[in-house]
Image: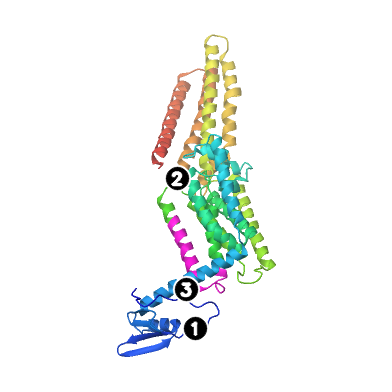
Amino acid sequence: MNSPNGTIPQPPGRESPPQYEWRARVGDDVLGPMSIEDLRQRVRDGSIPFHAETWQEGGQVRATAGEILEAYTRAREAYQSSEFLQRIHHLVPSARFTNLLTGACCLWFFVTFINGVSPISPTVADLVRWGGMSAQHIIEGQTWRLLSGAFVHVGIIHLFFNMWCLRNLGQIVERMFGGAAFLFIYLVAALGGNLCGLWWHPLIVSAGASGAVFGLIGAMLGFILVRRGEIKAGIFSRLLKSGLTFVGYNVIFGLMVPNIDNAAHLGGLATGFLAGACLSRPLFADPPRRPPWQYGLALLLCAAIVAASAARIVSLRSPASVAMAPLRIHEYSVDLHSVAQHSEQKWQQAEATHRNGFMTGAEAAALILREIVPDWQNLRRDYAPLAAVRSKKGCPADLAKELGILDEYVETQLALWDATARYYLKPDEQLSTERDALLQRLARLVRRWERIQRDRLQQRP
């Protein structure tokens, strides 16, 4: 901007009257004097061109109308930001809860480090051991993980980025809301973000304060939207733009980079927005008190999150939960392998004893029916609710295929041991052929299962 005779003056304060000190040349005519707002309106309606020569009375500033308005807008926003920051620093001189939360996260990271956890790439087992978000452990009663997960971090880079965001955002948000309200918002946003992750991807172990940090952005947006009539336009636009930019960048980044928990980010953002809207306060009142009904709304929000958490935990505990089916399929396959090994050992002992003449065929058949078949029947009974997942709406096709293989494997094992017991009672060629066919079917099922597991490993990023 060309301003050889001076600089843009500071915009008037809150109570100052408009200053009619601007003139503009349009063709051969000189318009003015006018206030800066009159100039803005005339540029807007086209009566003064954007490029028209404009100057201040006394020749302090001379430039185009567009340059004058742009510089004045920047100066006004800077002035309003300074006024806003002075006010919130007066209300809350020290952001002690921001410092407390930052220190707690760093301390917990140090504790994990001195106990042998890698500071660069901790394992999933390490994250679970030190309080990470794990649906499997939450449904077993460790509901405290919905909060503790916000204090565990996946390496020092993850910790540094989250603490940098927390320090920068917390300094402003804590002063806007006050210390106690800020702490409430942070913890509720952490809970809401982790709950969203529990709904969206319950099988993933997650950790980090990013959901709570997004909650601080949401709280700031909720505050300025509820109090937009009390916050000057300059500071409103700055806070809104910075908040939306932060959210947009991180959501896009999270979609492009694997292993970033966008569900927790968006859940924390939404929870923080609602909490911020509930607990906003009149910053320029003296004192800036909230009416009691705002505290009531905040408590209702907290109760709703707790109720949603309880409902989700109950649904995940159901043996027929589609969301937890992959984990239970893994447990089912482990139990199948264990029972199959136990059955094979029992049969080999019985076969050796029978072949050496120390056990009759009837006794061998009775041993199979007494010590082998019941194990498979119990396994089929225990996992019957999981088998019902196949017929539930929303069950993925690959999940239904895995369940089908496991169910067929158990039924084939039962048929095999029944045929084996009958063969010991009355050996004949037909039963021997039947046993061979069942063994071949089992081998085919095992190959299909191994192929599915191999394909899944290859599909992982």
Nearest-to-viewer mark from 2 and 1:
1
Tag of residue 18: 1
- Is residue 46 magenta-colored? no
Q: Main secondary structure of the magenta part?
A: helix
Left or right: residue 169 compared with residue 249: right
| SS at circle 3 | helix
Q: Quadrant of the C terminus?
A: top left
In the rendered structure, the answer to whether residue 308 lies left or right of residue 159 reads right
Q: Is residue 388 above or below residue 339?
A: below
Q: Residues within 10 Å of mark 3 (few under 14, many from 20)?
A: many
Q: Residues within 10 Å of mark 2 (few under 14, many from 20)?
A: few
State the residue in front, 338 or 353. 338
Q: Which residue is mark 3?
A: 76
User: Along the polypeptide, which appears first: circle 3 or circle 2?
Assistant: 3
Quadrant that contains the N terminus: bottom left
Q: Which residue type does callout 2 highlight?
A: Ala
| Residue type for callout 1 | Pro
Residue 397 numbered tag: 2
Range of magenta residues: 224-250
**Which element is circle 2 on?**
helix
